[in-house]
């Protein structure tokens, strides 16, 4: 594991007590800081000393900073209109039922989102719920032939993909990654949606499809420098799903966990940072642009991710490619925005591209905010051991293996949720 000397923190000093988003300086005018910014020091250099300052000033400021310089600004909340389009009452030998809801949101013409909701049967009261963003369509989560095939653009790395179109060969292709029966057996519901329903994950994404063009301002034909990218759009989709679940009342949204893998883990952490309804945040192997530090990276760098996936973030973030030291935050500040809620970083030993050690250090750097707010954060003295879950409010898990999701991961997710939801 790398030395922890870089956890020394610095402050950014600007003359104004609290800058508005419109007054944030251009990247070239941000101070250079090779060390981690202190999450409890505001943009003007003053230190947070009360909970009210954190809630009323620093939290809103950090939310604005992340959106302005990295992810892009989310549009306002939009009403959700839902209809039940398919269901089966006999899943897993009668232990569960599934339903497909078509969710419409946003301005007229915004592509709908298809939500798969899997509910345990015979349980007293409404169950807690995992909300998950999936890579390969709802039909890939279950082998049930009654689940409709995905009809929108299809992720090219999915099993059974032919020319970016879903096929019968792709049905159940990620069932071993979602482990829905295990989730049901542990007393949880699962609500999952395909990320391509919200925004197609195309490298050449010009934001002419998906949700983005439907939120353009009058006369606008392309995103501005600070408009939302794909990661923010996937997070926005998760927020709208939670809106629906609150209205539907078939699950306990007071006990809700959000989970996503890799790029969808980035969206998960960003969504959790902005939405306090998400009580447990599980960004799995999220790496650069998510759970790994932007400074001192091992594996993928800010420049590499912006070059390979230019549509994931806003058009300001690439300005930091070769000057990440100008970022007025690092990813520990995104974790701090989740405080005092529970966050689990989960990793694999061979997935060094996602920088597992750096992720653990982000939890350590976020811990002071949790303790400032009067709750435990990362368990003192905790060290990441293979296959052993650290289930403190800031949790960590690393297993042998590579960049994927498996049953061992889900056991850790469920154990962590039991600790912090039940």
Image (tube, rainbow, N blue to C red):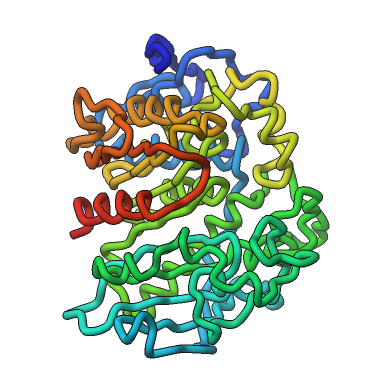
Depth check, front residue: 283 or 327: 283
Depth check, front residue: 90 or 337: 90
Which residue is located at x 39 percent, y 76 percent?
Answer: 118
* 281 relative position to 268: left or right: left
Q: Quick check: can you spot residue 182?
A: yes
> Residue 345's quadrant in the figure?
top left
Q: What is the quadrant of the C terminus in the image?
A: bottom left
Q: What is the quadrant of the N terminus in the image?
A: top left
Depth check, front residue: 372 or 126: 126
Position of residue 134 relative to residue 146, above or below, is above
> Residue 220's quadrant in the figure?
bottom right
Which residue is located at x 27 percent, y 63 percent?
Answer: 255
Position of residue 72 relative to residue 182, above or below, is above
* Residue 117 horizontal/vertical position (percent): 43, 76
Depth check, front residue: 274 or 393: 393
Q: Quick check: can you spot residue 281?
A: no
* Residue 405 horizontal/vertical position (percent): 46, 51
* 162 relative position to 111: left or right: right
Which residue is located at x 38 percent, y 29 percent?
Answer: 360
Q: Total marks drawn?
A: 0
* 270 relative position to 187: left or right: right
Which residue is located at x 69 percent, y 20 percent?
Answer: 322
* Residue 30 horizontal/vertical position (percent): 61, 20
* Residue 84 horizontal/vertical position (percent): 50, 88
Position of residue 13 relative to residue 173, above or below, is above
């Amino acid at each position: 594991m790398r030395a922890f000397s870089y956890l020394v923190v610095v402050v950014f000093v600007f003359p104004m007590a609290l800058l508005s988003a419109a007054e944030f300086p251009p990247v070239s005018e941000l101070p250079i800081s090779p060390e981690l910014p202190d999450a409890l020091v505001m943009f003007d250099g003053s230190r947070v000393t009360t909970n009210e300052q954190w809630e009323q000033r620093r939290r809103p400021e950090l939310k604005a900073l992340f959106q302005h310089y990295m992810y892009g600004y989310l549009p306002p909340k939009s009403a959700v209109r839902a209809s039940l389009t398919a269901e089966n009452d006999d899943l897993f030998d009668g232990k569960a039922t599934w339903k497909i809801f078509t969710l419409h949101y946003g301005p007229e013409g915004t592509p709908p989102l298809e939500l798969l909701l899997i509910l345990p049967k015979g349980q007293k009261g409404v169950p807690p719920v995992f909300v998950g963003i999936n890579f390969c369509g709802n039909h890939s989560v279950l082998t049930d032939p009654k689940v409709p095939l995905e009809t929108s653009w299809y992720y090219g790395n999915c099993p059974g993909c032919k020319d970016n179109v879903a096929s019968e060969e792709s049905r159940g292709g990620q069932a071993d990654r979602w482990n829905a029966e295990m989730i049901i057996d542990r007393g949880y519901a699962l609500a999952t949606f395909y990320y391509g329903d919200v925004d197609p994950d195309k490298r050449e994404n010009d934001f002419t499809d998906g949700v983005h063009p439907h939120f353009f301002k009058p006369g606008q034909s392309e995103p501005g420098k600070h408009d939302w990218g794909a990661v923010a759009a996937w997070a926005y989709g998760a927020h709208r799903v939670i809106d629906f679940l609150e209205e539907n009342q078939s699950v306990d949204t007071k006990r809700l966990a959000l989970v996503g893998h890799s790029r969808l883990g980035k969206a998960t952490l960003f969504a959790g940072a902005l939405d306090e309804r998400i009580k447990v945040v599980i960004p799995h192997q999220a790496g650069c642009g998510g759970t790994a530090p932007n400074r001192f990276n091992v594996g993928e760098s800010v420049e590499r991710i912006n070059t390979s996936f230019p549509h994931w973030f806003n058009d300001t973030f690439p300005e930091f490619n070769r000057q990440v030291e100008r970022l007025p935050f690092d990813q520990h500040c995104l974790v701090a925005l989740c405080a005092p809620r529970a966050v689990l970083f989960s990793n694999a030993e061979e997935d060094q591209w996602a920088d597992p050690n750096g992720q653990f250090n982000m939890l350590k750097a976020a811990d002071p905010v949790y303790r400032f707010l009067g709750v435990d954060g990362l368990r003192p003295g905790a060290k990441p051991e293979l296959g052993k879950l650290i289930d403190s409010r800031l949790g960590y898990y690393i297993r042998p293996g590579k960049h994927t999701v498996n049953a061992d991961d889900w056991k850790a997710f469920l154990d962590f949720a039991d600790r912090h939801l039940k």
